[in-house]
Image (cartoon, grey):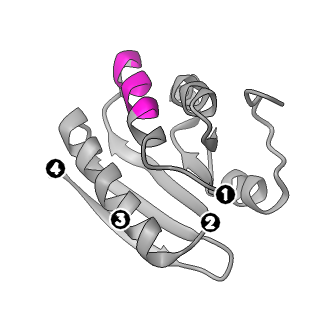
Amino acid sequence: MSFSSILKKTEQYLLLTAEGSYSYADMLEFVDKAMAGIEKSGFRRVIVDISKVLGNIPDEERFNLGVYCSQFLTGPLSIALVYRENDINHLFEHVAWNEGVRVSVVGGLEQATTWLTTGKSSAVLPGS
């Protein structure tokens, strides 16, 4: 895997961070590891911070990642995905929502924490 990941438990949520160079195969591997960590932790509120992953995620891969993640993300789980503000297009988010996953893509950790703890976001979310 060309990027590293860290899992950290807080009182309110599980924080997963990734850094390094983007590749679709590595992102799928990260998703698999993240899902295992989420399941093992028992947390229902999760922040995934990929804002330091270098490179852009093509739209087709954002779509595919939304579908892929929705296969694993079931039940009362809320995920805030932190990405670079200027690169957010909400495609992953829309696909995941359409597949029944409660997710918000935001531009910072503070926004992610706010969304997870209050359900409020400055982003326009599908279904809201």
Considering every residue shown, the one lying at the far left of the view is 1
- Circle 2 packing at 10 Å, graded few (<14), some (14-19), many (20+), is some
Residue position for label 4 = 2
Q: Which of marks 4 and 3 is nearer the N terminus?
A: 4
- Where residue 126 sits, quadrant-wise, is top right
Q: Which of marks 4 and 3 is in front?
A: 3
Cα–Cα span, label 2 and label 3: 13 Å
Q: Mark 1 points at which residue?
A: 76
**Alpha-carbon span between mark 1 and mark 4:** 31 Å
User: Along the horizontal axis of the image, is 91 left or right of 55?
Assistant: right
Above or below, 122 against 78 in this view is: above
- Label 3 sits on what residue type? Ala
Given the image, on which type of amino acid does mark 1 rest? Pro
Q: Which of marks 1 and 4 is nearer the N terminus?
A: 4
Task: Please name the residue shown 59% across and 26% down the image.
Answer: 90
Q: Single out the mark in the foreground, 1 or 4.
A: 1
Camera-nearest residue between 37 and 107? 37
Write down the residue under mark 2.
Answer: 44
Q: Which amino acid does label 2 sit on?
A: Arg
Where 126 falls versus 103 (above or below)? above
Q: Do the residues labelled 1 and 2 touch (CB within 8 Å)?
A: yes
Q: Does the magenta stretch include residue 60?
A: yes
Bounds of the magenta span?
Answer: 59-67
Instruction: Report the residue at 19% width, 38% height from top.
Output: 25
**Could you tell me how far apart the alpha carbons at marks 4 and 3 are, in whole angstroms?**
19 Å
Cα distance in 3D space between marks 2 and 4: 28 Å
Q: Quick one: label 2 or label 4, which is nearer the N terminus?
A: 4
Query: Which mark identifies residue 36?
Result: 3
